[in-house]
Amino acid sequence: MLRAILANQNTEVLRQLENLVDWRAEGVDLIDITDSGNRLIEQIKSLHPDLVILDTDLHGEVDWLDRNDQNGAKTSFAGMDIVEHYHPLRHYVRFIVMGDPEDYQTIKRAIRMEALDYLKKPVEKEDLQAALRLAIDRSISRQTMESLMPVVPEFRSDSYQSGALQIPDSEDDYTEKILDACNIDFATEFGVGICIGLRPEVSEELSKINYQKFTILTLAIYSRILTFFREKNIGFEVRRTAHRIRMMGVFPQGKEKLFLEEYIQPLLDELEELYQTKLCAGLGSYAYAKDQLLTSYRDAKYCYELYFFKQQQVLGWYEHVPKNKRVSPEVYEKNQDAVFQKILTKDPTIFETLEKSIDDIIKMHYGNWQAVIMRSMNYIGEINARLRRYKLVEEDYFSMHDELQQRLLQAMIASDVKQDLMEYFGKLMPKIYQNTRHSGKAAVEQVKTYMQENFMRDLSIKELSEVACVSTNYFSHMFKNETGQNYKAYLTGIRMEHAVNLLLNSDYGLYEISERAGYQNVRTFVDAFKQRYGLSPTKYKKKMLQGSGE
């Protein structure tokens, strides 16, 4: 049975969560609940749970977050800081995170920290049950893990405690410690970072089906890689995660163009044949001095993650860096405007423009797959916000939007992102075009309602024509034809009616009335008022109150 701790800063919500499911029936032994971040840390240290379910709002103060503080002062922390500190690199405790579904930065951080699941608040029973089942499926006993774990080098044996690799320092500190301890003769040898793992789509699918099988397979592959490097004396392990192993290769100088086909490629081919799976590898820059090793190590990880963009088995720093020009944020915004305009005007080339827009998002963040996913989610969110603003979508589109976000978060390669977005718009377009708002009289009525709701803002003809789903030139003609006046006069009428109501039925001064009527300048408001009513606001109020006998 999985041993778990439940943590939430709100005591009432904590009790609700405690009673939301039958924990033991779900295969979970709830060994503790707490509304304190500090207590949670202590319980993780003392109870060694397999699973922690925590809220991102959990907070407290500790002395290990700010490692630059030499005075031992305590530092405030939040829920995700705990997840990051007790990342799987350090412990075998896994996390389920509860948070705001719109907080994309926290979702991104949870993905990076390999959280099992991210539950939107307030947590539903079905969502919690599904997350617990996922935790059960992906669990593997400490005893099994220890029996499979290869012998670690002496310089980190002191960190191997209680069935978990506990690394007290930051990842960079730990990595630098290993690289500084290595012995490379840079007079005759060079170093190169090497990052190897299952291809992301293979890793994702296998870990979903059978996490224990996935874990055993990766450990077997890692063990064989270590044996290969040790027997040929061509490098050493630096770090591993659930999804990849990171090595530092050491080869004779002069082998820069040959080490791939002589060593790495045969190793990958052997492993793929032996385990009937697919691998990918990233190779770093060449290091000819100790102070270049860390850069090469990081370059290898970067190249490994380029699989998201290029889907090649091996990507090396020497052949990589993108020759395509980066796309600026201005191009992104223009693309978004173009797509939205074509939605409004039912332009048949909408999908061509959309495809270019997605390609530019991928180029914009080439080398950073997480940024591509987050930018794509923001892109859809911004388009949908406009559609909702102009009431062009119905309520049922929310489920489509949620489904798309989940699919984007699970995308393993750039083409998946593109396909998901294109399919989403393929389903969304018919729903928009079925909307009756694209006819003349109905469109003007919609604009009039929109002006009533937004008269305090500076409404441009471009914005109003988008609400009507017509061009700016046609909008002016259509609006005057339906109302008998141009849109500026109609908007002024709305503002003046509101101003008169405030003038006669409130104690607001002229400045406040002008601002609430949509004018930022009192002089402009007074002039407009006099032009419409023939009197200044003050004289108009006095005349109207005298006429009413007050």
Image (cartoon, grey):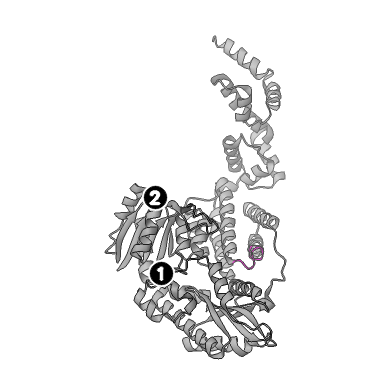
Q: Position of residue 68 (x, y in %)?
A: 55, 58
Is residue 212 or residue 278 the one in the foreground?
212
Tell me the kind of residue under disc 2. Gln
Asked if the magenta segment contains residue 362, the reply would be yes
- Which residue is at the front of the view, 231 or 412? 231
| Res 293 seen here | yes
| Residue beneath the point at 62% across and 82% down | 184
Residue located at (57% from left, 19% from top): 504
Q: Of the numbered discs in the image, which one, if any, rests on residue 92?
A: 1
Examine the structure image and report whether residue 321 is included in the region drawn in magenta.
Answer: no
Q: Secondary structure at mark 1?
A: loop
Amino acid marked by disc 1? Tyr
Q: Check residue 464 in the rendering and tell me which mark sits there, or answer none.
A: none
What is the quadrant of residue 93 in the picture?
A: bottom left
**Image vertical order of residue 267 relative to residue 456, above or below:** below
**SS of the residue at dot 2?**
loop
Q: CA distance from mark 1 to mark 2?
A: 24 Å
Q: Nearer the viewer, residue 301 or 238?
A: 238
Q: Earlier in the sequence, mark 1 or mark 2?
A: 2
Horizontal side of 343 relative to 505 (left or right) equals right
Callout 1 touching callout 2 (CB < 8 Å): no
Which image quadrant for residue 446? Answer: top right
Vertical order, 447 against 241 (above or below):
above
Q: Which residues are magenta?
A: 361-368
Estimate the x, y position of residue 182 in percent, counting from the top left: 58, 79
- Whether residue 126 is visible here, answered yes or no, is no
Q: Name the residue carrying label 2.
A: 9
User: Is the N terminus in the top left, top right, bottom left or bottom right quadrant?
Assistant: bottom left
